[in-house]
Image: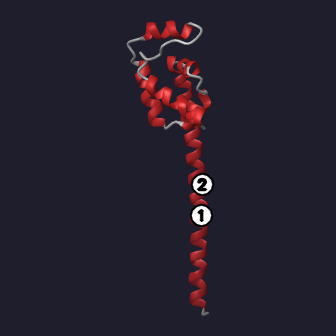
Amino acid sequence: MNSLSIGISAIFAILATAFGVLLLAAILGNQKTARRYRKEIGERLSNLRLSRMLARHHIDRNSYLHTQPVLDIEQQMKRCSSCAHTVRCDDLLAANGDADTSFCDNDDELQAIKRGNEAA
């Protein structure tokens, strides 16, 4: 091998190493951002009836936050915060035992999540 080939190989090795380091830094940064974002969603969720409705459906809140797509969670939170059935929901959440939750705009999705958790 001549010195030009060795020089080019060294440059490629340096560039590949730099690319690997930058890629790792980007992945770790994205994971940190995702954890922070899901934590913020969890805090917002705590202020909604949806959080208590998850418990009513026996869905673990932390599992819900970490397994469900963020867009789905955001849509469910939006539906909950704009719900017209708040009095009925409060009565249901205050009551013990099983009750009909079909009035809830998120009921179908929560039932599907519950079935998915039970199947796993």
Q: Is residue 72 above or below residue 20?
A: above
Residue in the foreground of this view, choosing between 70 and 105: 105
Quarter of the image for the C terminus: give it.
top right
Describe residue 75's horizontal placement relative to residue 25 as left or right.
Answer: left
- Work out how far the residue at label 2 is from the one at label 1, CA to CA, in angstroms: 9 Å
Dots 2, 1 in contact, CB < 8 A: no
Label located before the other in sequence (2 or 1): 1
Is residue 5 shown above or below 43?
below
Q: Which residue is mark 2?
A: 25
Colouring convention used in this rendered image of the protein: secondary structure
Find the residue positioned furthest to the bottom.
Answer: 2
* Residue that lies at the very extreme toward the front in this rendered image: 119
Q: Which residue is mark 1?
A: 20
Estimate the x, y position of residue 82 in percent, counting from the top left. 39, 18
Q: Is residue 86 above or below residue 53?
A: above
Snapshot quadrant of residue 55: top right
Relative image position of residue 9 (x, y in whole percent): 59, 81
Residue at 44% across / 23% down in the picture? 106
Residue 18's spot in the image, x, y percent?
59, 66
**Residue shown at the point (52%, 31%) measured from the top left:** 113
Mark number, residue 57: none
Which image quarter is the N terminus in? Answer: bottom right
Amino acid type of the residue that numbered disc 2 sits on in the rendered structure: Ala
Amino acid type of the residue tagged 1 in the rendering: Gly
In the picture shown, does residue 83 fall above or below 110?
above
